[in-house]
Image: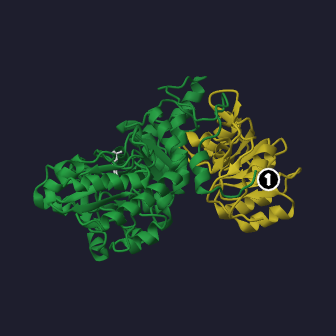
Amino acid sequence: MSSNQPGFSTLAIHAGAAPDAATGARATPIYQTTAFAFDDVDQAAALFGLQAFGNIYTRITNPTTAVLEERVAALEGGTAALAVASGHAAQLGVFHTLLQPGDEFIASNRLYGGSINQFNHSFKNFGWNVVWVDMADEEALKNAVSGKTKAIFLESLANPGGVVIDIEMVSKVAKAAGVPLIVDNTLATPYLCRPIEHGADIVVHSLTKFMGGHGNSMGGIIVDCGTFDWIASGRYPMLSEPRPEYQGMVLAETFGNFAFAIACRVLGLRDLGAAISPFNAFLIATGIETLPLRMQKHCDNALAVAEWLEAHDKVEWVQYAGLASDPCHALAQKYLPKGAGSVFTFGVKGGYEAGVKLVSSTGLLSHVANIGDAKSLIIHPASTTHRQLTDEQKTAAGAGPEVVRLSIGIEDVADIIADLEQALAEI
Amino acid sequence: MNHERYDDTYIRGILDEVKTIAVVGASANTVRPSYFVVKYLISKDYDVIPVNPGHSGREIAGAMTFASLTDIDRPVDMVDIFRNSEAAMGVVEEALELDPLPKVIWMQLSVRNDEAAKLAEAKGVKVVMNRCPKIEYARLCGEIGWAGVASNVISARKPKLQQGFQRFGINRHTKAGQ
Ligand SMILES: Cc1ncc(COP(=O)(O)O)c(C=O)c1O
């Protein structure tokens, strides 16, 4: 019964997961059910009216998923979280709660390609207009703010280039503009960086990657940092205006510093429907138990591989913020002191043909369009994920003909290097 | 007493000890936070007494409302204040006139009056400020986690299952989270 603050590794294992109340099962049970039987109509009415805590239907809440949510909220230092079907669903949920048609948001131009697509295409269909900015340029960022700006979005450690953004600088601009800062913390995970400590108001993840850690489950999550005052702002009607379907309840008033997560759940998830399966939530929550161990090993292995590649005569350049030579190294030391993650790119001599040959020649590294697996992964973006772009677009997106992306796993690093060595010899 | 941060053991001790709770400023409007608190505390088997002069003699969530603390017909263990920080002083002064004295003065989230707290503490009355008893109960018993809200509590002891639909009690050993 002590009130000492538990450490990160303790939270990764225990947060959210007491023994099951009914059976004492010590592992988190998989509540693979769509619905929960009511005792009486009064209880049901209280739950539907958001007056009581409890589970009704798995699209809205589920006890297995709740373990994952509380765990990630604790690790990020947030007030609450909402797990959903994928990282993209998490982003959709956040913007659905914040934006009205005709609103704008500012996004870093260094993002995962899928997010660039989501913002450029699907979001524009909803009338949510993205304004792209190079977040290394503070003036450009300030100039991009307009009366229509409702949010700022960035990746703490950007996919694929491993670019580190100065979160505190962006947070100052967001505060001056009176809008929440949303940080995608997928590549860093809270083990390497806690964006809330640098001024983030909302954190999102693709749990599909390092959080789950084993390449077996899609998932995403929205973390409410509890830092933004929706009532004082008054610019976010989903939170600060009475809701007709809840008899005129004002969510920000009723749920205080976790109102954003509740709004994403009882308005967004309820209507958009991208719920995570309890089985996936179980696998991801189990994966997170070893996050601190895995993440450190991912980083240590990645640094060793990056240093080895930098010295290789068939390699033109290596872009990894963990390397002392990298332009992002100073920012990485500030925001990610334990390591710069395990996703990075390098340029192979010989261009497109050499890139294709390399990814076709590995025996241990898997050729897949994914990152954040325990296994080491490799891909040649120009011939796969970025194939539909013109040459100029490819280069601008950091997917030029010579670029190879790695997601270094947690195997023995000597084996990873040996596989890359034999594959480079094939070129 | 440090009113910036409360130990979980202090809060749990209070919620374990009190049986009768007067909620000053309770609303009959079913979407107001004060109504939620009355309803939730009743569901946790507390004897809840709404206090609201505009609603006296009528029920809120099934509990009979009184016009003022001094009108209440039975001893009150805890006074929960749903008024603004300034108005809290008057409520505390009235509460300290009660005989027997309440054991606890509780001021809701965003309500804080240090002067009033000193008055109460000088008479041996425990004080909690800027907290919600519904949130604290749900946090300590584990129910709040179902809504994805961080309880900041970890435990290797199973939650105490109560009679009814998905109901937990607060009496178990826990370790505070962050
Ligand atoms: C940084 C980042 N954010 C978001 C996503 C999208 O996540 P998901 O594939 O789970 O929808 C990804 C996926 O690669 C990603 O790398």
Residue at screen point 32% across, 51% down = A419
Q: Amino acid at mark 1?
A: Val
In the displayed structure image, the side of residue A380 where residue A55 appears, left or right: right
Residue behind mark 1 = B104
Q: Chain drawn yellow, letter?
A: B
Q: Is residue B12 above or below residue A19?
A: below
Q: Chain of mark 1?
A: B
Chain A tint in image: green
Q: Tell me residue A424's x, y (percent).
A: 24, 56
Q: Tell me residue A182's x, y (percent).
A: 39, 58
Q: Is residue A133 above or below residue A290?
A: below
Q: Is residue B88 above or below residue B165?
A: below
Q: Is residue A385 above or below residue A63?
A: below
> Could you say whether the residue bearing mark 1 is in a helix, strand or loop?
strand
**Camera-nearest residue between B134 and A396:** A396
**Camera-nearest residue between A224 and A368:** A368
Q: Is residue A99 visible?
A: no
